[in-house]
Image (spheres, rainbow, N blue to C red):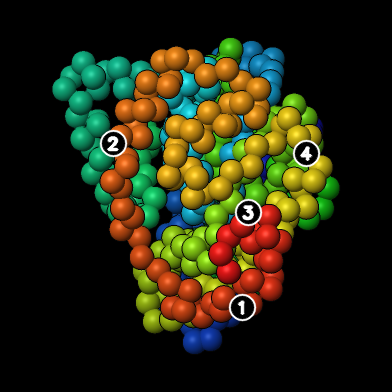
Amino acid sequence: MTYFHSSFYYTRYKILLKCWKLVLVGKPFNVKLFFFSFIFTIVFFLHQIINLLFRTIDEIIFFRYRAVKIKQPVFIVANPRSGTTYLHQLMTNDDRYAYMKLAFTIFPSVSFAKLYQLIAFIDRKTGRPMSWLMKKMEAVFFGGWKNIHPLAFNKAEEDEAIYTLALTSPAVLLVFPFLQQVKENWLLDDEPENVKTRMMNYYENCVKRFMYAEGKDKIYLAKNVMSSGRINSLLSRFADAKVIYIARNPYDALPSFISMFAVMYPTHTPHMKDDDAAKKAWALLGIAFYKHLNEARKNIAANDLCELKYDDLVAEPVHTIEKVYTKLQLDMPASMKVKLAELEMRNKNYKSKHYYTLEQYGLNKQEIYQELKFVFDQFGFKE
């Protein structure tokens, strides 16, 4: 019963119900938000049906995935907008790692992965018509994040969709502008034991399916900013895990966090101001992440934790990666060093097109400093 309830399938429906209540009682009633939420809900349940179908096929055909052991996984965590994507991109040049692509995080099942591989093979043999179609779809679904966090179905991505579609992630509130009112999704580590256990059962099961399909003999590499609020749960489940933590100056990270995660709000709530409580709540979540990670890191063995500064990663990526490998007692393949040098040359003139300020979101430097003085002190960030 436990296996089928949480490992096979888990969704925290109370979150969806609470969001819908807030949609319906909003004053004035937001018609755009109602229809946006209605369409999302239909798509959400259609997704669940398809996902359950794929996972059921796994139990019949690919049931041996259950025997997969997840050994010494590597989790890259940080406050959102702190360089996790860049570090993840650099580390994926090491062929010993297995990492999820966006498509799999949406449908975490062996049968879907096998179908995806088959379609990709046929696509390559027929002039890539499916690749063309997918790019068109990506432009429609992910166009709003183009200059913030480019997304693609076949691109390395964090495994957050697994949590989001189980309704245990703050990312659910990308759709519903109620982060300040739905705080059950902020920190999984602070939720009841049954919720943490079921979500970790489901997550571990998803990772096993992925590793069975993509890399049984590899090391699982995951980067996930929202895991800042579930790091204790992950370490309780994966006791031999390695953790890489990137710290960025809160003055830069917090407004960027808002800018990214409130990007959909103009679609359904066009008159919302930048300093609205619904947007500012993302900064409050960011502050909670900093505090939570600061406490969690105290319980991680020194050899299992590597702490980095965002500025160092951007300025000297190759040197920073070497530091990571040395700290975690990993050897770096010579072929990877060549790839990293090439990547560093390509990215050295990169400039972000993502613009934001503290003031536009009603954030105050002094208040942030008072809340996060320990971050400034530990990493030497300028006040």
Q: Mark 4 points at which residue?
A: 300
* Extreme residue in the left direction: 127
Q: In this view, does 214 lie to the left or right of 135?
A: right
Q: Which of marks 4 and 1 is in front?
A: 1
Quarter of the figure with the C terminus: bottom right
In the image, what residue type sits under mark 2? Arg
Q: Which mark is residue 346?
A: 2
Q: Residues within 10 Å of mark 2 (few under 14, many from 20)?
A: few
Residue indicated by mark 1: 366
Q: Name the residue under label 3.
A: 379
Which mark is first along the chain, 3 or 4? 4
Q: Give the spatial CA distance, label 2 vs label 1.
A: 38 Å
Q: For the residues marked 2 and 4, what is the alpha-carbon distance in whole angstroms?
A: 35 Å
Instruction: Name the front one of labels 3 and 1.
Output: 3
Tag 3: Cα neighbours inside 10 Å, few (<14), some, or many (≥20)? Answer: some
Q: At 32% from the left edge and 42% from the top edge, which residue is drawn?
A: 348
Q: Nearer the viewer, residue 319 or 123?
A: 319
Q: Is mark 4 on a helix, strand or loop?
A: loop
Tally of marks: 4
Q: Mark 4 vs mark 3: give the one in front.
A: 3
Residue at mark 4 to residue at mark 1: CA–CA distance: 31 Å
Which residue: 21% across, 16% down? 125
Question: In the depicted view, which residue is nearer to us: 373 or 279?
Answer: 373
> Could you tell me which secondary element the residue under label 3 belongs to?
helix
Badge 4: few (under 14), some or many (20 or more) residues near its Cα, within 10 Å? some
Task: Give the residue drawn at x 43%, y 45%.
Answer: 314
